[in-house]
Image (cartoon, helix red, strand yellow):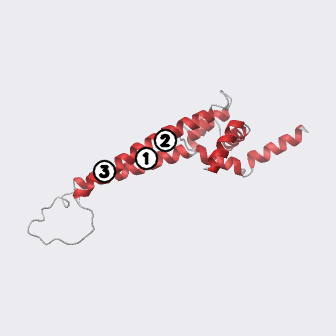
Amino acid sequence: MEKEKSKDELKLIEGKLTNDAEQLNKYLSQYRYCIEKKKTLETRRFEILRLFDDPICSVSLAGLPRGNSSGVGCDTLSFKLDEINSQIKNQIEKAENMLLDIINIINLLPENSLERAIVENKYIDLYNWNRICQKNHISKSPAIRRWRRGIYMLLEIEEVKKILTYNSNV
């Protein structure tokens, strides 16, 4: 019986993630997506600020014929800047809330376990696999196995199951 259980556990750790594990991975990755979106918005903000300094936008058109172009003028840049700033603020709030949710889930793992450390590095610290391995003094294959084990440990917890069920229905 014990050998069967370890064989099943090995299949889970080495094979393709189950649908539930994939769903949990996606849920835990939302903080990364929020941070990436914030960075994209900040890049757009930087581009708008750069356009304010562009001398072509500030050329006087006195005496020149005006066209019906729908191009972006300097007068609309401040509106776009306000909109981008608002989106960045909303994205920061969303990222903070998502981070708290993820921390609450990861706190369900055993406190000093390697699985917890790797899951924290992946989803909270946003480390890549090389950095995770370096930080935890482990090679990549065992690190991935421990990460997968952490994911499956979380899936055994009723609270995590409820969160995933709720998010799949939303």
- Residue 65 falls in which quadrant of the image? bottom left
Label located before the other in sequence (1 or 2) = 1
| Label 2 environment density (alpha carbons within 10 Å; few <14, some 14–19, many ≥20) | many
Q: Secondary structure at mark 1?
A: helix
Question: Which of 8 and 77 lies nearest the eye of the viewer?
Answer: 77
| Label 3 environment density (alpha carbons within 10 Å; few <14, some 14–19, many ≥20) | some
Residue 83 placed where, x, y %?
Answer: 34, 50
Question: Which of 140 and 16 lies nearest the eye of the viewer?
Answer: 16
Task: Locate the N terminus by quadrant.
Answer: top right
Label located before the other in sequence (1 or 3) = 1
Q: CA distance from mark 2 to mark 3?
A: 21 Å
Residue receiving disc 1: 38
As drawn, is 81 to the left or to the right of 40? left
Residue 11 placed where, x, y %?
Answer: 79, 47
What residue is shown at x 15% (from left), y 61% (from top)?
59
Q: Which mark is residue 128?
A: none
Q: Secondary structure at mark 2?
A: helix
- Residue 157 falls in which quadrant of the image? top right
Residue receiving disc 3: 81
As drawn, is 11 to the left or to the right of 137? right
What amino acid is at disc 3?
A: Leu
Residue receiving disc 2: 95
Q: CA distance from mark 1 to mark 2?
A: 9 Å
Q: Secondary structure at mark 3?
A: helix
Q: Are marks 1 and 2 in contact (CB under 8 Å)?
A: yes
Residue 55 placed where, x, y %?
Answer: 18, 58
Q: CA distance from mark 1 to mark 3?
A: 14 Å
What amino acid is at disc 2?
A: Ala
What amino acid is at disc 1?
A: Lys
